[in-house]
Amino acid sequence: ASGRCSTDSQLDRSVARCQLLTAAVVASRPGGFIGNPVRRVGFVASEAYARHTHFLSGSRFMGLAIALHVLSAVIWVGGMFFAYMAMRPAVVEVIDASQRGALWCHTLSRFFRWVWVSIILLLVTGYWMVFSVFGGMAGAGWHVHVMQALGIVMMLLFCHVYFAPFRRLKQAVANQDPQEGGRRVGQIRKLVGINLILGLITVVIGAGGRYL
C-alpha cells in the first residue's frame, strides 16, 4: 500500500511538472505571450498548478465519499442479511418463544441506531457526489438513478418498521406480552426481508451498473 501511495505521489508530481513545462513552452513561443513574457509564464504556470491542486483535492474528497457511502451500505445491508439468514433461524431453534420478542427488541434497538447513521451518511455522500462530481442528476448514469430510487424506498420501509411494528414490539416487551411481541416480530421479519432483497439489488447495481 505504501509503495502504491509513493507511486501515486510521484505520478502527481510528474503531471504537475509537465503542466508547468507545457505552460512555459507555450508562453515563450512567438505570439504566445502578451506583454512581459516572464509575467505570462508565471501566470500560466500558477493557473496550471492551481488546477492540479484542485483536482487532487477533489479526488481525495471523492475517495472519502465513496468509502463512507460503501461502508454505510455494507453496515445496513450486511446487518439485515445476518439478522434474516443467520440469527432468525438460530433464534427459532434455540430460544424459547416467550423470550424471542425481548431478544429481538434489544438486538434491533442496537442495530437500528447504526441504520440511522448509515442512512444519514448515504444521503450526504450520495448527493454530494451527484452534485459535485456529476453536476446534478442529469449528468448521472442510469444506475445512479436506480440506486437513488431503491434507496429511497428502502429508507421509507425502514422508517415504517421503526415507527410502527418496532415501536409496538417495544410496548409488548414492556407489557410482558410475548404473543403480541411475536406478532410484531413476524411483521418486522417480512418487511426486513423485502428491504434485504432491495438492498442486494442496489448493491449489485451500484457495483456493476456502470459496466452494463
Image: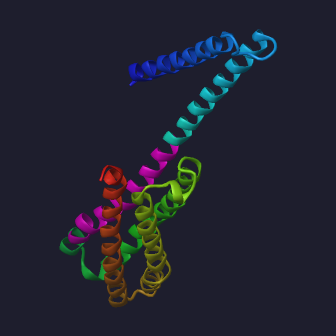
| Residue depicted at x 31% and y 51% | 208
Is the residue 137 above or below the residue 177 in the image? above
Left or right of residue 4: residue 33: right
| Residue depicted at x 59% and y 48% | 132
Q: Which quadrant of the figure has residue 44?
A: top right
| Residue depicted at x 32% and y 90% | 179
Image position, residue 80 (x, y; %): 34, 65
Q: Which of 203 and 12 is in front in this view?
A: 12
Image position, residue 128 (x, y; %): 57, 52
Image position, residue 101 (x, y; %): 35, 79
Q: Nearer the viewer, residue 34 or 209?
A: 34
Left or right of residue 46: residue 186: left
Whether the magenta-drawn stretch holds residue 172 is answered as no
Q: What is the image's colouring?
A: rainbow
Left or right of residue 66: residue 25: right
Is the residue 28 above or below the residue 73 in the image? above
| Residue depicted at x 18% and y 73% | 93
Q: Which of 34 and 203 is in front in this view?
A: 34
Residue stretch rendered in magenta on the structure: 64-89
Please name the predominant secondary structure of the magenta segment in the image.
Answer: helix
Is the residue 69 above or below the residue 165 in the image? above
Number of numbered discs overlaid on the protein picture: 0
Farthest residue to the left: give it: 93
Image position, residue 89 (x, y; %): 21, 71
